[in-house]
C-alpha cells in the first residue's frame, strides 16, 4: 500500500509538472503568434510602440502625433521613437507623414533640407536620401516631387538605392530606437500648424493609399 501511495503521489507531481511546462510553452507560443499576426497589418501598432516628440528627445513618450507651428524659412526639430516590445527582432519601413494645415496642400518644394540622426547606428541622413511614397507605392525623390493639384499629406521614407526601394529597418527585441530630424522649410511655404506622425510599416503601397485617402 505504501509503494502504491508513493507511486500515486509521484504520478500526481509529474502531471502537475507537465501542466506547468505546457502552460509556459503555450504562453511563449501565444506571444509569438500574436507578434506574427500584427506584422500582417499595414502599419504595426503592437508590439511596436511608436512615439514622436518635439525637439531632440528619444524617450518613448506614447505621443502619436505633434502639431508644429511652421513659418517660411524656419527649421523644425522632432524625434520619432520606435520601441519593439516583442521577444524577436522585427523588420519594416519607418515612414514619417507630414499633414498640411486644413485647406492647404503640398505642391512641391516646401521642404528644402533634412538632416536625420539615428540612435542605433549613429548615421546621418541628408536631404538626398529622402523620398516621397506615391499612392501607387513608387518612390520619388523629395527634392524632385511636385503635384500641381496638391496633396494634403507627404509620406516620407529613406532610400539608399536612388529610389528603387525604400530602406528597411530592423528593430531589436526590447529596444527603443530613435531618429532625430531637422527639417528646413522654403520661405514660400504656407504658414500654419503642420501635423507630424510616424509609423512602422510593412506594406508601403497599402499604407500610402490609406494615408492619402484619409
Image: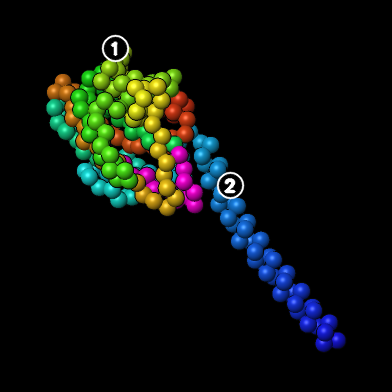
Residue 120, how many percent across, how many down?
Answer: 32, 46
The residue carrying mark 1 is 148
Looking at the rendered image, the quarter that the N terminus falls into is bottom right
Residue 78, how many percent across, how many down?
Answer: 24, 40
Residue placed at 60% from the left, 52% from the top?
29
* Magenta segment boundaries in residue numbering: 79-91
Q: Secondary structure at mark 1?
A: loop
Residue placed at 61% from the left, 61% from the top?
24
Q: Nearer the viewer, mark 2 or mark 1?
A: 2
Query: Can residue 79 be seen here?
Result: no
Residue placed at 24% from the left, 31% from the top?
126
Query: Can residue 42 be seen here?
Result: yes
Q: Secondary structure at mark 2?
A: helix
In the visual, does 83 lie left or right of 148? right
**Which disc is residue 40 wearing?**
none
Task: Please determine whether, in this image, residue 80 is positioned above or below residue 214.
Answer: below
Does 72 lie within the magenta span? Answer: no
In the visual, does 171 lie left or right of 74? right
Residue 27, how many percent across, how many down?
Answer: 59, 57
Among numbered discs 2 and 1, the one appearing first in the sequence:
2
Q: Quadrant of residue 180?
A: top left
Query: What main secondary structure does the magenta stretch of the protein show?
Result: strand
Residue 122, how many percent across, how many down?
Answer: 28, 43
Mark 1, other Cα within 10 Å: few <14 / some 14–19 / many ≥20: few
Task: Please determine whether, in this image, residue 40 is positioned above or below residue 211.
Answer: below
**Residue lying farthest right?**
1
The residue carrying mark 2 is 33
Does 84 lie within the magenta span? Answer: yes
User: In terms of depth relative to the viewer, which is nearer, 187 or 12?
Assistant: 12
In the visual, does 117 lie left or right of 200? left
Mark 2, other Cα within 10 Å: few <14 / some 14–19 / many ≥20: few
Amino acid at each position: 500500500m505504501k509503494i502504491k501511495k508513493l507511486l500515486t503521489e509521484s504520478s500526481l507531481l509529474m502531471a502537475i509538472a507537465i501542466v506547468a511546462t505546457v502552460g509556459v510553452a503555450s504562453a511563449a507560443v501565444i506571444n509569438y503568434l500574436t507578434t506574427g499576426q500584427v506584422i500582417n497589418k499595414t502599419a504595426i501598432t503592437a508590439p511596436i510602440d511608436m512615439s514622436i516628440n518635439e525637439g531632440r528627445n528619444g524617450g518613448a513618450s506614447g505621443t502619436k502625433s505633434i502639431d508644429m507651428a511652421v513659418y517660411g524659412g524656419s527649421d523644425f526639430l522632432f524625434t520619432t521613437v520606435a520601441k519593439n516590445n516583442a521577444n524577436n527582432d522585427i523588420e519594416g519601413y519607418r515612414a514619417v507623414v507630414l499633414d498640411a494645415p486644413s485647406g492647404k496642400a503640398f505642391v512641391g518644394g516646401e521642404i528644402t533640407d533634412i538632416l536625420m540622426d539615428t540612435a542605433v547606428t549613429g548615421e546621418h541622413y541628408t536631404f538626398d536620401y529622402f523620398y516621397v511614397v506615391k499612392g501607387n507605392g513608387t518612390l520619388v525623390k523629395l527634392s524632385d516631387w511636385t503635384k500641381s493639384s496638391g496633396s494634403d499629406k507627404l509620406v516620407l521614407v529613406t532610400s539608399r538605392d536612388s529610389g528603387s526601394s525604400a530602406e528597411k529597418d530592423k528593430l531589436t527585441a526590447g529596444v527603443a530606437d530613435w531618429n532625430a530630424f531637422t527639417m528646413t522649410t522654403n520661405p514660400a511655404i504656407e504658414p500654419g500648424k503642420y501635423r507630424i506622425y510616424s509609423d512602422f510599416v510593412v506594406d508601403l503601397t497599402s499604407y500610402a493609399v490609406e494615408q492619402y485617402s484619409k
